[in-house]
Image: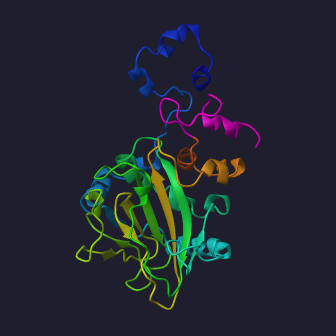
Amino acid sequence: MSHLSGPLDPDRSGADAIGSLDGLHADLARRHRATQSSGATVPAAVVDADLAAVERDGYVILEGLLTASECEDVRTAVTPLLDKPGRNTFEGRRTQRVYSVLNKTRVCDRLVDHPRVLALLDRLFLPNYLLSQLQVINIHPGETAQLLHPDDKMYPIPRPRPPMGAATVWAIDAFTQDNGATVVLPGSHRWGEERKPGDDDTRVKAVMPPGSCVFFVGTLWHGGGANESDRARLAITAQYCEPWLRPQEAFTLSTTRDTVRTVSEDIHRMLGYSIHPPFIGMVDGMHPKRLLDTPS
């Protein structure tokens, strides 16, 4: 453990002594403590209102977070990356998806670490929560509705329970009633293990203007809507999880160290260049941010 905190100093040996399991709740990394996220800049009253909606319904729509110009920048950068349709009906036979986005463009960073989103994550999860997935999703006309699902079903912990993760779906195109807007089931985040969506359960389409996002917890049942319009619907989704869970995307493998050096401190932390106390995430006994101080 001495590598995490640096060489032992005889004058500080008392502070380094771990005499009980309670001592393992401390951050042994010391030199690279958890940093305050940019979510701290959001007024508390705004976060309180957003969180109240999430706790009540399982989701909240946050409108007008990006300008029209920022949306156009996203479109310009990601359109050349769009290629093959999905490999199955869950990904969507008429839906294009882009993975490893951070390694391909910086234009989506603002969506990943937007203060309004991080402010909610700061309330919901432990410090040093992680980015679990980042995708571009382009739903073409004729796509059918996606199978309804909760995102953190992959974690085998019975419901009802607190969410293990959360997600945002950002509207780069307007989300309308007929172009594939995300479908959410209000209140379904509180359902037990055996309950599944039925015909009588309320379904809401996340209709919103460009530059907005729908934020929902990982226990909420939802799915991509059918695109019955004559135009594609472009969106970006970022998903997050507790710091002690394995993310869906192995960002420490899919994102080069040179790329990591260019992103914000918030994204550093969420990519796994952080420690969940006392030492989850270490590399060779050291804090992972030490890797950024050495050549790739």
Q: Is residue 278 above or below residue 165?
A: above
Residue farthest to the right, as pictured: 295
- Extreme-front residue of the structure: 194
**Magenta highlight: main SS:** loop
Q: In this view, does 258 lie to the left or right of 59?
A: right
Question: Where is residue 174 shown, x and y percent of the image?
Answer: 45, 80
Asked if one can make out residue 62 in the rendered structure from this viewpoint, the answer is: no
Q: Which quadrant would the C terminus be assigned to in this image?
A: top right
Please name whichever residue, 200 or 243, is drawn nearer the observer in this view of the structure.
200
Q: Residue at x 44, y 63 (%)?
A: 168
Q: How is the image coloured?
A: rainbow
Provide residue 82's location: percent of width, then percent of height.
64, 75
In this orientation, which residue lies closer to the viewer: 75 or 243? 243
Residue at (29% x, 75% y) in the render:
203
- The magenta stretch is 274-296
How many numbered circles are shown? Answer: 0
| Residue 109: x %, y % from top left | 57, 59
Answer left or right for 53 relative to 13.
left
Q: In this view, does 249 lie above or below 221?
A: above
Query: Quick one: quadrant of the N terminus?
Result: top right
Across and down, in percent, residue 111 comes to: 51, 62
Q: Is residue 202 visible?
A: yes
Query: Residue 272 magenta-drawn?
Result: no
Foreground residue among 267 and 220: 220
Q: In this view, does 220 lie above or below 199?
A: above
Q: Residue at 26% of width from left, 57% of height from top?
A: 190
